[in-house]
Amino acid sequence: MEKNAYLDAMGITRWKKAIPQADIMTVLVNPLRIKDVDSPIIGIVLNLIGVDVNHCRFAVRAEEGAKVIWDMRGKQSVASDERLVSAPINELESSVDAKRALWANMQAYMLSKEA
């Protein structure tokens, strides 16, 4: 009799090594726009930088130790090559200049990740 079949017949479950979950990344959102996180722009931008939207959480402020991938709180944002920085989603949807600024920041972000 096969070993696994024997263990199954006895009702013994085998231990499996846990597969670590992917890091949950944080997207900081303007408190007034927390309900607008289902915008297609967010999914497109995250896809372009290689991040699965399902591995992201949306918050109005960063918790200690959180891995912030994108700060879209507008004027509250601090420019950095370690994360995307942009205007809030309502401005991204309506302003060409906000999209251009995000695109420029995305290029700098992706170059810093390649280095």
Image: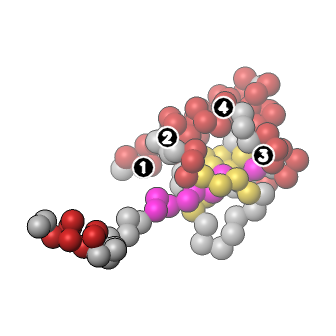
Q: Please, which residue is most extreme toward the left here?
A: 1
Q: Amino acid at mark 3?
A: Gly
Nearer-the-camera pick, 95 or 54: 54
Instruction: Write down the residue under mark 2.
Output: 49
- Residue 113 has which mark? 1
Q: CA distance from mark 3 to mark 2?
A: 20 Å
Characterize the local packing of mark 1: few (<14), some (14-19) or many (20 or more) Cα atoms within 10 angstroms.
few
Nearer-the-camera pick, 39 or 99: 39
Q: Earlier in the sequence, mark 1 or mark 4?
A: 4
Assess whether mark 1 and mark 2 are in contact (beta carbons under 8 angstroms): yes
- Residue 41 has which mark? 4
Q: Nearer the viewer, mark 2 or mark 1?
A: 2
Assess whether mark 2 and mark 3 are in contact (beta carbons under 8 angstroms): no
Q: Position of residue 2 (x, y in %)?
A: 13, 65
Q: Earlier in the sequence, mark 3 or mark 2?
A: 2
Q: Position of residue 75 (x, y in %)?
A: 80, 48
Give the residues in magenta.
21-29
Q: CA distance from mark 2 to mark 1?
A: 10 Å
Instruction: Write down the residue under mark 3.
Output: 74
Residue at 76% over, 27% down: 93
Secondary structure under tag 2 reads loop
The N terminus sits in image quarter: bottom left
Q: Amino acid at mark 4?
A: Ile
